[in-house]
Amino acid sequence: MINLPLVSVIIVVKNGEKFLQTAIKSVLNQTYKNYEIIVIDGNSNDKTPIIAQSYPQIRYFLQNSQGIADAYNQGIDEAKAELITFLSCDDIWTHDKLKIQVDYMIDNPQIQGVIGKVKFFLEEGNLLPSGFKTELLEGDHIAKIMETLMVRKSVFEKVGNFNPEFWVAEDTDWFARCNDENISIKVIDQVFLHKRIHNNNNSIIHPEQNKNLLKILRESIHRKRKKFS
């Protein structure tokens, strides 16, 4: 019988008291049970620390720097597992997310990461943020985002951690570097994430988003040219 691998679940949060408990419960309700939960708190001034530290399953750390990229990196450094996952404090995993992904990684040892699908939902009482496409609220969608990802920790040794230069789109930059290094990240045709849309979705409303995306594209083109020159 195969020993079930440990999974590190990294939750990055700052002032997330409103939704954090629901996110944590979606991890605790997983059918796959061999995991650790790491919470990196960006020095919240609400009840986030109290909520996170009320769960004995959680390893809680104050962020020792600033920005979501550095918070992700701190979580990766603290992770004890070879399989790494991420969950935003305002999102919800489906109950079988970890089991399906772990089974796939065991059955396909050559695969270095997997992603899945997302369903978006608008938080009650909130308006759609500017720039969010209304049609995304319908059906499910393939999502190359952190919250659907499971990846081997060794991938970070090859492509590097998240770039703290990017306060938003840090995940887009990391996925681009994976693609440029031919890291094999496969899509599982199943919904793993219910993603909450609300007025404080930083990745949607941040003014630096488009600027960063253009810079990421230019850097990817430069890497490819350098690789084949």
Image (spheres, rainbow, N blue to C red):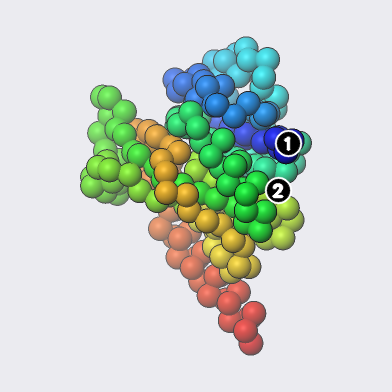
Q: Which mark is residue 153?
A: 2
Rendered view: 77 above or below 162: above
Image spot of residue 147 (x, y percent): 50, 41
Query: Amino acid under label 2?
Result: Lys
Query: Is any atom of residue 73 visible in this view?
Result: no
Q: Which mark is residue 138?
A: none
Q: Nearer the viewer, residue 111 or 176?
A: 111
Identify which residue is drawn at 55% across, 70% down: 220
Q: Locate residue 116 relative to residue 138 in the image: left or right.
A: right
Image spot of residue 81 (x, y percent): 73, 38
Camera-nearest label, 2 or 1: 1
Q: Nearer the viewer, residue 212 or 24?
A: 24
Query: Amino acid under label 1?
Result: Met
Q: Locate residue 224 relative to residue 144 in the image: left or right.
A: right
Check disc 2: other Cα within 10 Å, few if <14, some if 14-19, many if 20+: many
Q: Nearer the viewer, residue 174 or 109?
A: 109
Q: Which residue is mark 1?
A: 1
User: Number of callouts in the render?
Assistant: 2
Q: Quadrant of the N terminus?
A: top right
Q: Locate residue 2 relative to residue 44 in the image: left or right.
A: right
Q: Earlier in the sequence, mark 2 or mark 1?
A: 1
Q: Secondary structure at mark 1?
A: loop
Image spot of residue 17 (x, y percent): 49, 20
How far apart are labels 2 and 1 at the CA level?
23 Å
Identify which residue is drawn at 23% across, 47% down: 135
Q: Residue furthest bottom?
A: 229
Q: Residue furthest front?
A: 1
Which quadrant of the view contains residue 119? top left
Which quadrant of the view contains residue 111? bottom right
Q: Quadrant of the C terminus?
A: bottom right
Rendered view: 169 above or below 225: above
Q: Secondary structure at mark 2?
A: loop
